[in-house]
């Protein structure tokens, strides 16, 4: 990964994936210098937010204009290798399905060419009362 090619929020690729750089800091690690398992969830969350931003979908605007937010319904994560303090990682995020209220995103975290962790996340669009609602057409249009 060449850090010089990144904008602050990452970059979109020609196949619709979004690439987001992550640096591992001391606060992300456990006593051994390995990334603590819950820190990977934070990295993936940031990458999903930047994927949406890259498609001009902003959480604050979505809530203000549509009364809609996202909640994670399910998350399947597989830890394949440990990431370590000072590693420069890259998270690839790609929407693989939009159906009803659900948005399914596949995410892969790499260090160089090695896959460290991968996840499949199902997020649902919800109203402020917490009930699911269909994905707004503006999001469908932006992400298709």
Image: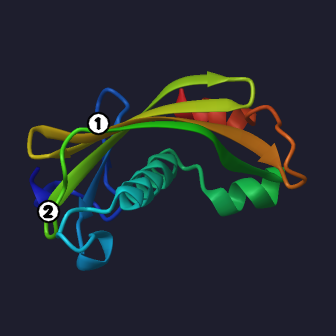
Q: Which mark is residue 87?
A: 2
Q: Is residue 32 visible?
A: yes
**Can residue 108 be seen?**
no
Q: Give me the residue at 43% from left, 54% from top.
A: 41
Regarding mark 2 in the picture, which secondary structure is present there? loop
Residue at the spot of label 1:
13
Residue placed most toward the observer, 109 or 137: 109
* Crowdedness near tag 2: few (<14), some (14–19) or many (≥20) residues, C-alpha within 10 Å: some
From the top left corner, tell me how far across and down residue 5 is, in percent.
16, 55
Q: Quadrant of residue 86?
A: bottom left
* Residue 76 or residue 128, whichever sits in front: 76
Residue at image x 37%, y 31%? 16
Q: Which residue ends up furthest to the front in the rendered image?
A: 31
Judge left or right: residue 15 versus residue 90: right
Quarter of the C terminus within the rendering: top right
Left or right placement of residue 112 versus residue 20 in this view:
left
Above/below status of 29 relative to 115: below
Nearer-the-camera pick, 110 or 144: 110
Q: Nearer the viewer, residue 52 or 121?
A: 121
Q: Secondary structure at mark 1?
A: loop
Residue at 29% in and 36% down: 13
Image location of residue 134, percent across then percent down: 79, 31
């Amino acid at each position: 990964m060449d850090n010089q090619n990144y904008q602050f929020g990452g970059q979109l690729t020609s196949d619709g994936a979004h690439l987001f750089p992550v640096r591992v800091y001391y606060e992300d690690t456990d006593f051994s210098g390995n990334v603590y398992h819950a820190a990977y969830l934070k990295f993936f969350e940031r990458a999903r937010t930047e994927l949406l931003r890259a498609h001009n979908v902003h959480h604050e605007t979505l809530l203000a204009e549509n009364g809609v937010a996202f909640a994670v319904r399910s998350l399947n994560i597989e830890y394949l290798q440990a990431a370590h303090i000072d590693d420069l990682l890259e998270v690839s995020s790609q929407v693989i399905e939009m159906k009803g209220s659900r948005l399914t995103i596949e995410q892969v975290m790499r260090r160089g060419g090695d896959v460290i962790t991968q996840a499949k996340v199902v997020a649902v669009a919800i109203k402020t009362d917490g009930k699911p609602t269909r994905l707004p057409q503006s999001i469908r249009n932006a992400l298709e």
